[in-house]
């Protein structure tokens, strides 16, 4: 949308970001650029013209850089600067320690994207020469050009939710790894077991039957000799380990029949089934820890008063919303819903020039964890959310410039992020009329939650 000044909303927001950076990277502040490492920190003190005023290399952890900051303040004063602004790449969690030190010392703090440092390294002298000292200077030059950003300053609640989200992502990966390992091992030594259920690793009955086999020491012949009734009784007794109470007799019969199936590498079967038993125990333990961390995450939503708001979106669970918010952080720090979508890398990246019109694709330049969380949430929301389902149907219709199913789901994931931004920042529950564009939100020129 173009205003009378000729500036677009994007221009104004970009100008606001530059103004906010200029308030931190002031002309009366020298620039202390630090190339952070585990035990070695390389720093360059620079002016705004790119001149190096001093260098210092210290072999301490990032949290012990108070002496370096005092040195920089003294050097800056001798060169006529009133204060110092620190800058670094967001390396691990070390940059947070440096930000805390800068805040305590009354100094400014900015971050520079690692990708920009990489590009600047190539543009500096047209080589790929990389040293800590050169990287520190490049970071300083980028800061002087206002080519950095003000990092997130999360409060205790949002910081805790982000840490819990990181732990959940690791546990989900562990659980998936256990599932894949069980399937791979069975495919080698006992493939008939996998055919006993349509989705065996998602069936509690199948898992209970597999638990009977591994508890029996992989003696398939002895289990077969005990008869189907004995096998079914043993499987029913193990359902509670998987949080179930009813056994599928069809799956139990299929697993019992598989006991006498000779397919598979027989010499590998005893060892592989023993290993499957160990992996199954790991999987159960991982699921227990996963349930605990998810309960903590939903508890954080309750504490922040967000549960009722985010679950007002049909098809979005409290856990799904917590996972997304753990990746975004406080949504009020984003200037617009589009900024959240760009942060996830779900925004369309155009490829046009004059009369040339290239193919538009997703940018995929944002936060991968956020993109994955939104993508997973859409799968659960689509069957239960009429507005989202209508959008998906429209995007895949034959009489339009239709998208393939994966592209339409990505667009729906971006829509879900826009809704969350509107709901959390405005503290208003989901309204399907506003979300579908049939009603405008109060005080807004455009539908706040429009799909």
Image (cartoon, rainbow, N blue to C red):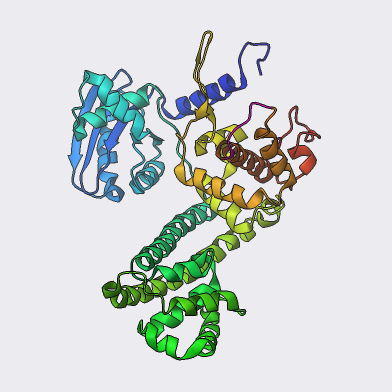
Can I make out residue 244 in this image? Answer: no
Q: Quadrant of the N terminus?
A: top right
Q: Which residues are magenta?
A: 400-405
Q: How many marks?
A: 0
Q: Quadrant of residue 203?
A: bottom right
Measured along the vertical axis of the image, is residue 45 above or below residue 65?
A: above
- Asked whether residue 392 appears in the rendered view, the answer is yes
Where's residue 56, x and y in %?
A: 19, 36
Against 51, is 269 above or below?
below
Q: Nearer the viewer, residue 57 or 400?
A: 400
Seen from the viewer's position, the closer of residues 23 and 314 is 314
Image vertical order of residue 429 relative to residue 352, above or below: below
Q: Is residue 178 left or right of residue 324?
A: left
Q: Position of residue 171 (x, y in %)?
A: 43, 61
Q: Main secondary structure of the magenta part?
A: loop
Looking at the picture, how far across and down is residue 128, in whole percent?
Answer: 21, 27
């Amino acid at each position: 949308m173009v205003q009378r000044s000729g500036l677009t909303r994007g221009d104004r927001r970009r100008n606001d970001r530059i103004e906010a950076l200029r308030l931190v990277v002031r002309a009366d502040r020298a620039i202390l650029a630090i190339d952070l490492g585990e035990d070695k920190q390389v720093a360059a003190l620079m002016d705004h013209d790119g001149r190096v005023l001093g260098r210092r290399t210290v072999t301490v952890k990032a949290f012990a850089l108070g002496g370096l900051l005092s040195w920089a303040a003294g050097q800056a004063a001798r060169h006529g600067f009133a204060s110092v602004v620190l800058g670094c790449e967001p390396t691990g969690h070390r940059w947070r320690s440096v930000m805390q030190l800068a805040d305590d010392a009354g100094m400014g703090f900015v971050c520079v994207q690692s990708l920009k440092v990489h590009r600047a390294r190539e543009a500096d002298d047209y080589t790929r020469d990389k040293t800590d000292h050169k990287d520190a200077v490049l970071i300083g030059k980028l800061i002087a050009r206002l080519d950095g950003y003000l990092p997130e300053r999360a409060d205790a609640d949002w910081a805790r939710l982000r840490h819990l989200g990181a732990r959940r992502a690791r546990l989900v990966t562990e659980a998936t790894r256990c599932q894949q390992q069980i399937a791979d091992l069975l495919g080698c030594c006992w493939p008939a077991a996998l055919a006993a259920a349509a989705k065996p690793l998602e069936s509690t009955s199948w898992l209970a039957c597999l638990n009977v086999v591994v508890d029996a020491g992989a003696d398939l012949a002895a289990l077969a000799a005990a008869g189907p009734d004995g096998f079914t009784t043993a499987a029913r007794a193990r359902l509670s380990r998987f949080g179930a109470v009813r056994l599928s007799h069809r799956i139990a019969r299929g697993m019992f029949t598989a006991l006498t199936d000779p397919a598979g590498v027989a010499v590998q079967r005893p060892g592989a089934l023993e290993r499957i038993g160990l992996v199954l125990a790991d999987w159960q333990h991982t699921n227990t820890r996963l349930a605990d961390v998810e309960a903590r995450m939903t508890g954080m939503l309750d504490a922040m008063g967000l549960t009722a708001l985010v679950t007002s979106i049909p098809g979005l669970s409290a856990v799904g919303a917590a996972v997304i918010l753990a990746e975004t952080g406080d949504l009020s720090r984003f200037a617009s819903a589009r900024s959240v979508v760009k942060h996830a890398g779900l925004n369309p990246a155009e490829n046009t020039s004059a009369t040339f019109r290239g193919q538009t694709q997703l940018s995929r330049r944002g936060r991968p964890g956020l993109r994955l969380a939104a993508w997973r949430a859409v799968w659960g929301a689509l069957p239960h959310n009429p507005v989202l389902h209508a959008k998906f149907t429209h995007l895949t219709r034959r009489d339009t410039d239709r998208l393939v199913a994966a592209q339409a789901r990505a667009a729906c994931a971006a829509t879900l992020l826009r809704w969350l931004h509107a709901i959390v920042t405005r503290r208003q529950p989901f309204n399907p009329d506003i979300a579908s564009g049939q009603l405008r939100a109060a005080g807004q020129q455009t539908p706040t939650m429009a799909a």
